[in-house]
Image: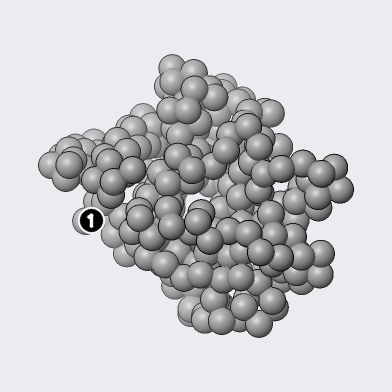
Amino acid sequence: MTANEYNNIANDARKKVLEMIYRAQSSHLGSNFSCIDILSVLFERMDLKKDKFIASKGWVAASVYYFLSQKGVIPEADLERYCQPGEEKYIGLVEPRGVFGMEFAGGSMGYGLPAGVGFALAKRLNREEGNIHVLMSDGEMQTGTTWESVLIAKHHNLSNVVVWVDNNRLQAMGETKAILNVEPIDERVRLFGWDVQRIDGHDFLATESVFQKLGGSSPHMIVCDTVKGKGWKRAEHNNLYHYKNISEEEFTEAMQELSASHG
């Protein structure tokens, strides 16, 4: 697939996710927009029959549900239910409900990788093919459960673990480096014996190329340098949009920007 084709996929995703968040008057637009380019490639390249996907940063539920609908895993019409009053299935944090290998609910920081390591070990013991893809935030690299899991994954040489870190450098209360600096993430994790790559998380072809390098005997981490709020200038690098609800004026502005940038 070409970079332009991926760009169109991501752009369509941002417009729909923007619409979902605006209609629901829910939050986390900035976090959703930073990882949509990564997810655009993942959902093209993952084997939906063999792989499992864990959204450890489960607050990007709108994006995950969008891509699941595009793959026919859930009905596209169900996106209209996102975070609506009384809704129990499509809420603001990922609720697995047994769809496409999603057997773990993300949302509390630092629990996605422990679950992923467990699933990966189970796959090995059961001699099952496929990888466990875990989408994490850079803020989750501050938690002790993450580093315990890094140790365990290497101890068992779980090469079927693939961690994608959405490194947008911002978390709920400010800059990641000011709250608890985790950089250089790639160098630190490499010291634990992992195979680590660092890429531009908005470079679709760089993300796609990662799949050609999987294998070997070590677990994999891809540190994806991203921009929070990517795609809407007002929201880019702006941590206000971690929690902020979107006004009608902002919705119109963002939708116009996204429509103008469609390839």
Residue 106 appears in the picture as rendered: no
From the viewer's perspective, is residue 96 above or below residue 170?
Answer: above
Q: Residue 97: horizontal and vertical position, in percent?
A: 67, 28
Which residue is depicted at the point 44% across and 20% down?
A: 76
Looking at the image, is 157 positioned above or below residue 230?
Answer: below
The three-letter code of the residue at mark 1 reads Arg
Is 180 displayed left or right of 174 in the figure? right
Question: Which quadrant of the view contains residue 143?
Answer: bottom right
- Between residue 163 and residue 182, name the one nearer to us: 163
Give the residue displayed 29% in from the left and 35% down from the top. 12
Q: Is residue 155 visible?
A: yes
The residue where tag 1 is placed is 234
Q: Position of residue 171 (x, y in %)?
A: 48, 64
The C terminus, quarter of image: top left
Q: Position of residue 118 (x, y in %)?
A: 79, 52
Q: Residues within 10 Å of mark 1 (few under 14, many from 20)?
A: some
- The one nearer the camera, 10 or 77, is 10
227 shown above or below 243? below
Q: Quadrant of the N terminus?
A: top left
Horizontal side, residue 20 vs residue 57: left or right: left
Residue 251 located left or right of residue 260: right
